[in-house]
Image: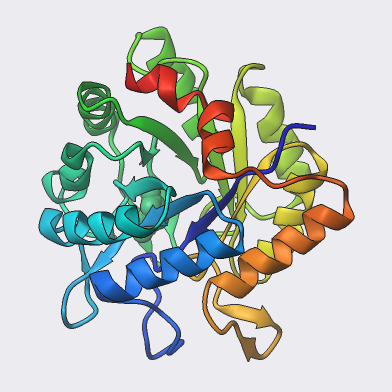
Amino acid sequence: MEKLIITAALVGAEVTRQQTPFLPYSPREIAAEAKRVWDAGASIVHLHMRDASGNPSSDKTLFAETISYIRSETDLIIQVSTGGALGMTASQRIQPVTLAPEMASVSTGSVNFGKDVFSNPLPMVREFVRICNRHHVKPEIEVFDSSMVENALLLTQEGLLRPPLHFNFVLGVPGGMAATARNLLFLLQLIPQASTWTISGIGRHQLTMNALGILLAGHVRTGLEDNIFWRKGELAKGNAPFVERLVQLAGSLDRPVAAPHEAREILKLDDFAS
Ligand code: KMH
Ligand code: ZN
């Protein structure tokens, strides 16, 4: 099997310090957390930003500052979020892509998200992908529902998304697809054969979905964006313990973990940048 790429989603937009004190907020805190997950074995960091009060922000200067700290200490692959937070405008959400990181998450459709709607109308998605292409940023297609795979295939036919595609199946958001093995196996039937894929499980489904990803030759995302609990009733003391646990699990299953330069090869990021 190919080496395992571990992505750490360090902070997200919806989790708060009221829920867990271990959430990094400032550029320095997020960069320090990035260094810890890199030391633990992650090769990608998925980034959201917070303003000084801890509110979600897509401010380009916050991203730029954080990315420069991370790059000064690690060779992590930087993946910015274009999902941002519920209620952000498209022009806010796309800002960090113009910094030309190596990757950006792009959801290719709308979905209920708890009591809200995560809105991604197709014309906006097309524009996001065009801007990614202009800045040589590889999209990670963030799939909360199977229709998002169908839309990604449509954008590929239109010549906007360029294969090999990379998907992240985010299962277990209330309103989206449930975190079940059956749903994952169904989604895997929909994607083109040359694609790469990652699995993220929300809340208590994080570890079980990650375990499936390791066994099924996919890649895995962990981190406080998706889950704040180490086990039932016990908060995780940051993102790095999650990564350490996955490295151990992968080792037990004879699946070596990819360093960032190996992840770049697996995801064909260098081809994408040229
Ligand atoms: N904050 C969620 C509404 C992404 O990063 O691309 C969307 C999200 C997806 O987090
Ligand atoms: Zn995100």
Q: Is residue 265 above or below residue 86?
A: above
User: What colour scheme was applied to this rendering of the protein?
Assistant: rainbow
Which part of the image, by quadrant, shows the N terminus? top right
> Looking at the image, in which quadrant does ligand 1 appear?
bottom left
Q: Nearer the viewer, residue 238 or 161?
A: 238
Is 72 left or right of 191, judged from the image as shown? Answer: left
Q: Nearer the viewer, residue 62 or 84?
A: 62
Residue 69 at least partly seen: yes
Q: Is residue 226 above or below residue 194?
A: below
Is 97 left or right of 9, judged from the image as shown? Answer: left
Name the quadrant containing residue 87.
bottom left
Q: Position of residue 98 (x, y in %)?
A: 16, 38
Q: Position of residue 203 (x, y in %)?
A: 60, 70
Q: Position of residue 107 (x, y in %)?
A: 39, 40
The residue located at (17%, 62%) in the rendering is 62
Q: Position of residue 86 (x, y in %)?
A: 28, 60
Is 245 left or right of 44, judged from the image as shown? Answer: right
Q: Residue furthest front?
A: 73
Is 33 left or right of 169, judged from the image as shown? Answer: left
Q: Nearer the viewer, residue 76 or 150?
A: 76
Q: Nearer the viewer, residue 142 or 109?
A: 142
The residue located at (42%, 17%) in the rendering is 271
The residue located at (18%, 54%) in the rendering is 64
Which part of the image, by quadrant, shows the C terminus? top left
Q: Is residue 166 above or below residue 155?
A: below
